Amino acid sequence: ASNHTYVTLSYLWGEGGNEMPFSGRLPLKTPRTIEDALLVTLRLGFQYLWIDRYCINQDNVGETYAQLRLMGSIYRNSELTLIAAAGDDPSYGLPGVGKRHRTPLASAQIGHHFLRQARDISHVVWESRWHSRGWTYQEGILATRRLVFTDEQVYFEC
C-alpha cells in the first residue's frame, strides 16, 4: 500500500467479532458503517480504503501477527483515517453520510446570521464507546489526519 494513497477506517466491530471466514474480498452485504466509509472514500477522491476486518486474515495467526506489527505504519501512512465515533457496532453507519442522520444542533437566527450550539468535540469523542476501546483509540492516535464522525457533527483534525 506504500505506493498507493489510501484511507483507513477506525470503528467498532461490535459483539459479533469476525463472523465471516476471510475471503480477501468485501462481502456482497456489508454493515452500514462500511458502506458509508466506502462512499466517503470515493467522494473524497480516493480509490482505496483499508479496513482491518477485511484486510487482515484473522484465521491465519501468522498473517494476523505480521499485520498487527504494521498497524502503526498502516494508520500513520494513510492519507486520512475515518473515525466512526458514533454507535456501538458497524451497523450504525456514519451520521450524515447514508441513512443515519445527524442529531440537529440547537440554533438561532439573528438577522441573516445563524448561530449553532455545538458541544466540544473532545467531550463528544471522550464519551463515545469508540474512545473507550484500546484498539480503536490506538488507531486514532496513530493516524496523522482524522475525520471524526459523531452523532452531532463531523470534525477534521490534523
Image: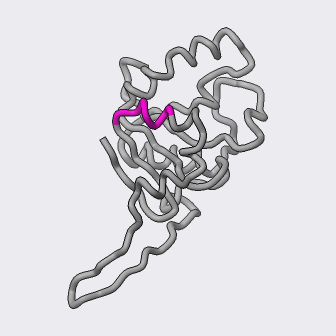
Which residue lies most toward the left here? Answer: 112
Can residue 3 be found in the magenta stretch? no
Front-lying residue, 25 or 145: 145
Magenta region: 138-144
Q: In this view, does 104 lie above or below 95?
A: below
Which residue lies most toward the bottom here? Answer: 111
**Residue 154: x percent and y percent?**
41, 57
Front-lying residue, 143 or 125: 125
Question: Left or right of 16: which side holds 123?
Answer: left
Which SS type dominates the magenta stretch?
A: helix
Q: In this view, does 95 lie above or below 105?
A: above
Which residue lies most toward the top here? Answer: 62
Total number of numbered discs in the rendering: 0
* Residue 51 occupies quadrant: top right
**Residue 89: x percent and y percent?**
67, 48
Question: Left or right of 9: which side holds 2?
Answer: left
**Residue 96: x percent and y percent?**
48, 62
Q: Which residue is drawn at 30% across and 41% down?
A: 158
**Residue 133: x percent and y percent?**
60, 39
| The N terminus lies in quadrant | top left
Can residue 141 be found in the magenta stretch? yes
Q: Residue at x 48, y 45 (%)?
A: 83
User: In the rendered view, how is the structure colored?
Assistant: one colour
Q: Is residue 25 above or below residue 2?
A: below
Q: Residue at x 34, y 49 (%)?
A: 156
* Residue 116 occupies quadrant: bottom left
